[in-house]
Amino acid sequence: MKRINVIKIATENLDDFRQMAMHAKEVGATHVMAGQMPRSRWMWEQDLTDPYPNWSMGHAQLFKLVCPPQLKEFLPQDHIAECFNLFKARCDILKEVGLKPALFSNEPFWLPEEVYRAHPDWRGARCDHPRRSRKPYYSPCVDNPEVLAMYKYAVKVLCQETGLDYLQFMSNDSGGGLCWSTGTYVGPNGPESCRNRSMADRVAGFVDALTEGGKEAGVDIVVHFNSDIPFKAKEIGVATACPKLKDNQIVNTMNNKNEVVVASIVDLGYPGRPVKKLPEPVTFAKFARIAQDCSEPITMFGFPRSDFDECWEIYRQTQLQQPKSIADCFKVLQDAATTIVGDKLAGRLVDMWYHIDEAFTHLDHTGLDLIMYGCQHQRWINRPFVLFPTELAEEDRAYYRKFQFQAQKEENTYDLLDMQGIEGVRGFTATFMLGETLQKAIRCLQQAIGEAAYLLEQTGDKRFDMLRRRMIAEKCFFKNIIHAAKFQELVDRTDFETEPRNELRWPTRNDGRIEEFQNITRAEIDNMYELISVLGDDLEEIILCTTPEEEDIFRYSTNFIDQLRRKAEIMLEHMNDGKRVYETHNI
């Protein structure tokens, strides 16, 4: 199998894509992922009360790029044309630079219900998550010859028009699903017509159709079908397809000789973090060392963005020095830092990078991405923490409620720690441990913030000021996680039915919960004003956001600052609510 080095990097426009492609060429890439697509809001707008499509709106599904004639009446042609033209423009740039395009997606991907009402035989597996969707979503059955013909057509057009020759799929997640696979969230399911077909034949048949599409376009395309997702059990049934594969076909990283031929050094499907361009050079240097040692013929590697884009220099130094240990990686970091700030300040820059890395390590120890699941999906960051949320006026709830990922009963939406049916945190002990872990992360970030301020003073480089502000914003998100967990833990041990008894004795200080309520809410109010202050006039530069019309569960609105201010004001207006459930002090 030919050597393929695929780099994935987020870009802001075609000029930026060209610049990043040139960097990729310099460090030895053969391919660049070109499928970063506009979010397909039409998927969600079918039913805005159902949050599930938010998981997959940003993926580059094949039928989002090329619409087979059989689907034209069901899919938005203008959006497909927009996505295809963007993909084609990126592929043209790669051709000029001397690289090839690669595409990452999730297939077979769900189609609108109208498709299956018109073509019942196409309905395949139910592929949604039953706790995160309000209705079933179905992928097309790839045992059906008509469905396979549509996939073959899409690959043929893509290969003909763009030169695509590497295609990788994720399945059984984010809106994709395979008939009778053990990996779908609802369990093995699909039409009776294909129930007894072997999984090996099903997978091999699907991959064959994609390969044939490429061959008809004159391209010997490499197709990698992957159903192994880290937090789920291995898909043993899908892997049985490996002996049936042909050359340049891969299933779950293995070829037809059961050899592992793909090394993924980065999660290609990770959604955008709310605070943009926070660098993680120490982690990147460790991954770069691993990438250099990979013996697999296909390597997938993600390059993160930051204000300095230091990953390119770190990777160049890695190639030059060939580090063999973590200690060697710090020599790589020192030399990369020297190119940015000079020898005198390089150590301080590496220290800053180290403290950032430590902060994210502590965040990872929480065991669940609480920034995504909580601050984004449950809108902790901009929703008010109040004891009686059902009493809020409609306008004081609507601005965050419709962007809250919660598909269960409405009562679940009031519980801060019910995150799409997951309880990552609950009770005093979990809240205490979470708070201690994130306080360590905050202290690390504070050290990094101090280093950035020093480097700004010494160099006058305004990028250090922007980085400092990004880190302060991230610190506010960390604090928000602590406050959300503490507030809900307090709510969980509050009696909302019995009126509190107020002793007339003096002095009395019988119920410490009133102090907890006051201190948690005041800390969060202050946190919001700190975040508002650091964002200033640079909201869109610091926070992942979009216009109010395009706001969704993964992206905030450009009205974000107004929402933070309103959250603080609502909480201030409800500070006396504690008197309704807790005995107040008389001292």
Image (cartoon, grey):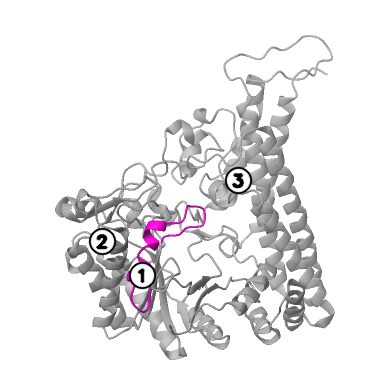
Image coordinates of residue 154 in percent, x first then y, are: 26, 72
Do the numbered discs 3 and 2 sit on residues whose CB atoms are within 8 Å? no
Q: Nearer the viewer, residue 305 or 206?
A: 206
Q: Residue at x 61, y 28 (%)?
A: 491
**Circle 2 Cα neighbour tier, 10 Å, few/some/many (<14 / 14–19 / ≥20):** many
Q: Is residue 162 above or below residue 370?
A: below
Going by the numbered disc 1, the residue's amino acid type is Pro
Q: Nearer the viewer, mark 2 or mark 1?
A: 1
**Quadrant of the image for the C terminus?**
top right
State the CA–CA distance, disc 2 to disc 1: 19 Å
Residue neighbourhood size for the residue with mark 1, other residues' Cα within 10 Å, grouped as few (<14), some (14–19), many (≥20): some
Where 113 falls versus 17 (above or below)?
A: above
Res. 458 in view: no
User: x, y percentage for residue 355?
Assistant: 75, 62
- Per the model, the C-alpha gap separating discs 1 and 3 is 60 Å
Task: Please tell me whether residue 233 belongs to the stretch shown in magenta.
Answer: yes
Where is residue 390 shown, x and y percent of the image?
A: 50, 29
Secondary structure type for disc 3: helix
Residue type of the residue flagged with mark 2: Val
Asked whether residue 331 is drawn in magenta, I would say no
Query: Which residue was labeled with disc 2?
Result: 142
Residue 565 shows which numbered tag? 3
**What is the C-alpha distance between the residues marked 3 and 2?**
50 Å
> Horizontal placement of 306 versus 128: left or right?
right
Question: Tag 1 or tag 2, which sits nearer the N-term?
Answer: 2
For label 1, the residue is: 243
* Residue 301 visible, this angle: yes
Looking at the rendering, which quadrant does residue 254 occupy?
Answer: bottom left
Camera-near label (3 vs 2) is: 2
In the image, residue 93 above or below residue 530? below
